[in-house]
Structures are given as C-alpha cells and as structure tokens.
Amino acid sequence: MAEKIMSDFIANFEIKKYSTHTYNDANIEKGILNFSNHVNADLIAIYTHNRTALSNFFNGSISEDLVNHAIKPVITFKIKNK
C-alpha cells in the first residue's frame, strides 16, 4: 500500500529517474539511521513541521532526534503551515 501511495504521488510530476524504498525498523529514528548506513548515504535530509516546543515535548521530534544521534550530517526542510 505504501508503494502505491508513493507511486501515485510521483506520477503527478515529470520525474524520469527515481527510486523509492520501504524500510522497517524498531522506530522511525532507528529506521532512518539504519537505512542511511545500509545505502552508505552521505547526508540525511528530512522535513519538519516546525512545531512549538510544547508540542515537541509531548510528541517528540524525529528531526531533533536524528540531529542529536546521527553521525552523518542532517539537513532539515521546514514545511510551511497554511
């Protein structure tokens, strides 16, 4: 199901060469870190919703966890709320 959602999304753009990956792990942070090691990535890029500190306290922040625990560089992109 995840593969179909990704394929449907990409079909909206004129992208000719791309690849998608599904990787399962104990949690999201470990999955991203382990996958980046598996593919020997030079960089981890992730988007952030730029939530408030109070929201992060209750919900946690995957981006912040990655920045604090990754050995590789991490770049974050802010998603603008409408």
Image (cartoon, rainbow, N blue to C red):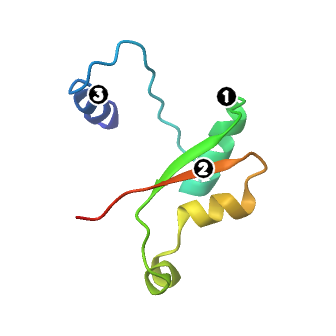
Q: What is the C-alpha distance between the residues marked 1 and 2?
A: 17 Å
User: Is 7 on the left or on the right of 59, as rendered?
Assistant: left
Residue 77 picture location, percent across and down: 48, 52
Query: Mark 3 = which residue?
Result: 10
Does 76 appear above or below 38? below
**Three-letter amino acid code of the residue under disc 3:** Ile
Q: What is the C-alpha distance between the residues marked 1 and 3?
A: 22 Å
Q: Residue furthest bottom?
A: 54
User: 7 and 53: which one is in front?
Assistant: 53
Residue 16 picture location, percent across and down: 35, 12
Q: Nearer the viewer, mark 3 or mark 2?
A: 2
Q: How many marks?
A: 3
Quadrant location of residue 26?
bottom right
Does 64 appear above or below 37? below
- Give yes or no for contact between labels 1 and 2 (Cβ–Cβ under 8 Å): no
Label 2 packing within 10 angstroms: few (<14), some (14-19), many (20+): few
Secondary structure of the residue carrying numbered label 3: helix
Q: Nearer the viewer, mark 1 or mark 3?
A: 3
Secondary structure of the residue carrying numbered label 1: loop
Q: Going 25% across and 25% down the picture, which residue do you hit? A: 13
**Three-letter amino acid code of the residue under disc 2:** Ile
Does 67 appear above or below 24? below
Query: Mark 1 = which residue?
Result: 39
User: 1 and 58: which one is in front?
Assistant: 58
Query: Mark 2 = which residue?
Result: 75
User: 25 and 68: which one is in front?
Assistant: 68
Label 3 packing within 10 angstroms: few (<14), some (14-19), many (20+): some
Q: Which quadrant is home to the C terminus?
A: bottom left
- Give yes or no for contact between labels 1 and 3 (Cβ–Cβ under 8 Å): no
